[in-house]
């Protein structure tokens, strides 16, 4: 007998269908009837007949014809939604993952931050390497021996935290693991997005694949099957203190896998976990001894969000150089501050790279600029710090990102359980690898570092908008007074920079004793990761406003043209945002520019020119500088 899971006003209802000739309209009416029956006030209706509704698929959100038969329109165990006329459509359904998925093999040792972000986007499914499978089997044998011999081992035959000295009888060891997952599922706040839930689940699989957790291969394969079907548990974003690992969010992750709580999939939207698993032909995990602990102990919440943060930080840092170079052109700045010799005598790697990017984008024999030529013989000697010091300010951001990425790369391929199972020694050892101090400190540092891109960008926006500094119309608009132009867009940038200042306060300097003083020092790394992501989003938005302002400034310098790569950036922006001739609704323009930066379109346009310039400028050896680049004609004003 086919059965359909129907969503009506926040309720999920299982509706069996005895007759395949029944219509989609019948299914909708039957779901509404059951919904009314469950409500004390009948949901506000007097009869099913008065309810007007339409029906759509949960996957893809496609509308269904009410006159079609269910056997023609739907698959068995399909998830659909009944939308009652006049109601707001449910926001709980999210577009499904991309088609054409390929596999990535995990072994616990070679995952990269880029791989993890791609896994989050649904670009890959997961399988284990044969070596990983063998290690998982060997570690599980140690656990089974402990249980058989009734050895007292933390978390396997004892309680947890303060209850570590309470020995649990063998008959209740499986119940112990289920109780652990249920009791620790105590998070609050919004659920992680599907992308972030995928990252968290993928990273937990990678850690389990190392073979130090004691999980059985059968259970791990079930976890992988859930990931590959994109069955993603409801994971509240708040509740971890970052030691003993990310217990609350990882417990919610495990809760869904055992068929409790809620899950999301592209096919179902949000629904009871057991229904989502069943709809994908999967069965809930039955936890064996140690397996609940194996699923919830580790730093994967901090680290998975941290990987997204470091990848987005890398992307916006590269593009910040391009945006700043465009602003320098509009403000008729000099290229002298980017001279190779200046940066060779202060040879920080990030500083040298930023200066090189400026040289590759600005006026040179490779890319002459009519704008630069127009002020070549002016009497200005040097520019304000916000332009002249970009290599120094942007440079340390690049070095900060590289430092943090190195820590993240180590962390995502680390075993962070407790106790650790060492098959070669045939024993378990309790330690502290679950402590999140490493990623927590690194992500606090990342937020502080990347924020500076917004701080200096906001000051450049001020210079673009202020006619006494820019020699351009006030707020970059004609008929000032009648039009306000970029006046309030600059205020938005200032507001975001101010908010970032509070968000940059490091959460990892705090610690509160938990678990009856057993866990008496914690990292608070969950908040480190979440606020780092918020800081980075603000940085992206501020730079989006600068990008729009710089392109608007170009309009007032026409018919003069800037360099070829910067003209390409201008053309890209103009493909989604038209020039400002008079005031209009600005928020969509900022969002469009923000999207260009998030999708790295600005980098994609400029990168070929930067790399071509790199190939044509062979580094010269200089004392104290591993790399330095020929200046060409960039020493000119």
Image: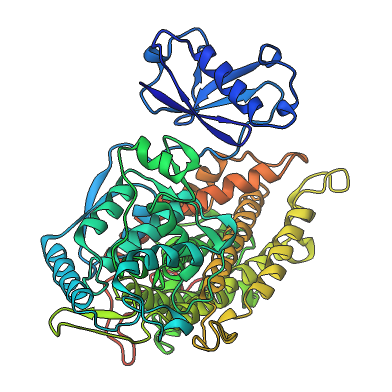
Decide if residue 81 is in sight here: yes
Is the residue 447 above or below the residue 254 in the image? below
- Give the x, y percent position of residue 213: 27, 72
Front-lying residue, 103 or 451: 103
- Give the x, y percent position of residue 453: 57, 70
- Give the x, y percent position of residue 38: 64, 31
| Furthest residue toward bottom | 623
Identify the residue at horizontal 57%, vertical 86% (top origin): 513
Question: Which quarter of the figure has residue 573?
Answer: top right
Decide if residue 609 is in sight here: no
Give left or right: position of 158 versus 187. Answer: left
Q: How is the image coloured?
A: rainbow
Identify the residue at horizontal 50%, vertical 7% (top origin): 67
Give left or right: position of 73 versus 509. Answer: left
The N terminus - image quarter: top left
Give left or right: position of 137 versus 417. Answer: left
Identify the residue at horizontal 57%, vertical 77% (top origin): 448
The C terminus - image quarter: bottom right
Marks counted in the figure total 0
- Give the x, y percent position of residue 218: 21, 56
Front-lying residue, 317 or 185: 185
């Amino acid at each position: 007998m086919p059965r359909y899971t129907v969503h009506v006003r926040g309720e999920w209802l299982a509706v069996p269908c005895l007759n395949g000739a029944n219509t989609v309209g019948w299914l909708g009416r039957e779901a509404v009837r059951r919904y009314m029956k469950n409500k004390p006030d009948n949901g506000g209706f007097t009869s099913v007949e008065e309810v007007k509704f339409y029906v759509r698929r949960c996957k893809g959100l496609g509308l269904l014809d009410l006159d079609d038969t269910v056997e023609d329109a739907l698959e068995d165990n399909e998830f659909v939604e009944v939308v009652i006329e006049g109601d707001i459509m449910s926001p709980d359904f999210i577009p499904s993952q991309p088609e054409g998925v390929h596999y990535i093999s995990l072994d616990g040792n070679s995952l990269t931050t880029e791989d993890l972000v791609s896994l989050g986007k649904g670009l890959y499914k997961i399988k284990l390497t044969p070596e990983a499978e063998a290690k998982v089997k060997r570690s599980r044998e140690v656990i089974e021996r402990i249980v058989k011999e009734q050895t007292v081992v933390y978390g396997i035959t004892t309680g947890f935290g303060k209850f570590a000295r309470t020995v649990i009888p063998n008959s209740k060891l499986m119940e112990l693991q289920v109780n652990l997952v249920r009791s620790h599922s105590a998070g609050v706040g919004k659920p992680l997005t599907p992308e972030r839930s995928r990252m968290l689940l993928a990273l937990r699989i990678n850690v389990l694949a190392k073979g130090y957790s004691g999980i059985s291969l059968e259970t791990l394969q079930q976890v992988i099957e859930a990931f590959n079907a994109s069955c993603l548990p409801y994971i509240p974003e708040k509740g971890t203190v970052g030691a003993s690992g990310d217990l609350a969010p990882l417990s919610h992750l495990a809760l869904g896998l055992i068929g409790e709580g809620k899950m999301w999939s592209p096919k179902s939207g949000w629904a009871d976990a057991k229904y989502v698993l069943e709809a994908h032909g999967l069965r809930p995990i039955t936890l064996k001894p140690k397996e609940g602990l194996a699923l919830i102990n580790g730093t994967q919440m901090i680290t998975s969000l941290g990987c997204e943060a470091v990848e987005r930080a890398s992307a916006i840092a590269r593009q910040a150089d391009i945006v700043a170079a465009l602003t320098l052109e509009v403000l008729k700045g000099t290229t002298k501050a980017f001279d190779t010799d200046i940066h060779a005598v202060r040879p920080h790697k990030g500083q040298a790279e930023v200066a090189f990017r400026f040289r590759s984008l600005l006026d040179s024999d490779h890319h002459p600029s009519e704008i630069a030529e127009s002020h070549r013989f002016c009497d200005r000697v040097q520019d304000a710090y916000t332009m002249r010091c970009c290599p120094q300010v942007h440079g340390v951001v690049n070095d900060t990102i590289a430092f943090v990425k190195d820590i993240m790369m180590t962390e995502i391929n680390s075993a962070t359980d407790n106790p650790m199972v060492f098959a070669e020694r045939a024993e378990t050892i309790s330690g502290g690898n679950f402590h999140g101090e490493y990623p927590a400190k690194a992500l606090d540092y990342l937020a502080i570092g990347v924020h500076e891109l917004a701080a200096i960008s906001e000051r450049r926006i001020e210079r673009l908008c202020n006619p006494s500094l820019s020699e351009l119309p006030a707020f970059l608009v004609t008929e000032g007074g009648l039009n306000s132009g970029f006046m309030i867009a600059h205020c938005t940038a200032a507001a975001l920079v101010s908010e970032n200042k509070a968000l940059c306060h490091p959460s990892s300097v705090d610690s509160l004793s938990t678990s009856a003083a057993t866990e008496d020092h914690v990292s608070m790394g969950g908040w480190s990761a979440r606020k780092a992501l918020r800081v980075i989003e603000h940085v992206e938005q501020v730079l989006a406003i600068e990008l729009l302002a710089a392109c608007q400034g170009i309009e007032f310098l026409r018919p003069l043209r800037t360099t070829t790569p910067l003209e390409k950036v201008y053309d890209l922006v103009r493909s989604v945002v038209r020039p400002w001739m008079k005031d209009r609704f600005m928020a969509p323009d900022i969002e469009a520019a923000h999207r260009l930066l998030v999708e790295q379109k600005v980098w994609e346009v400029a990168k070929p020119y930067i790399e071509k310039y790199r190939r044509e400028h062979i580094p010269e050896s200089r004392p104290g500088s591993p790399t330095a680049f020929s200046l060409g004609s960039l020493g000119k004003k």
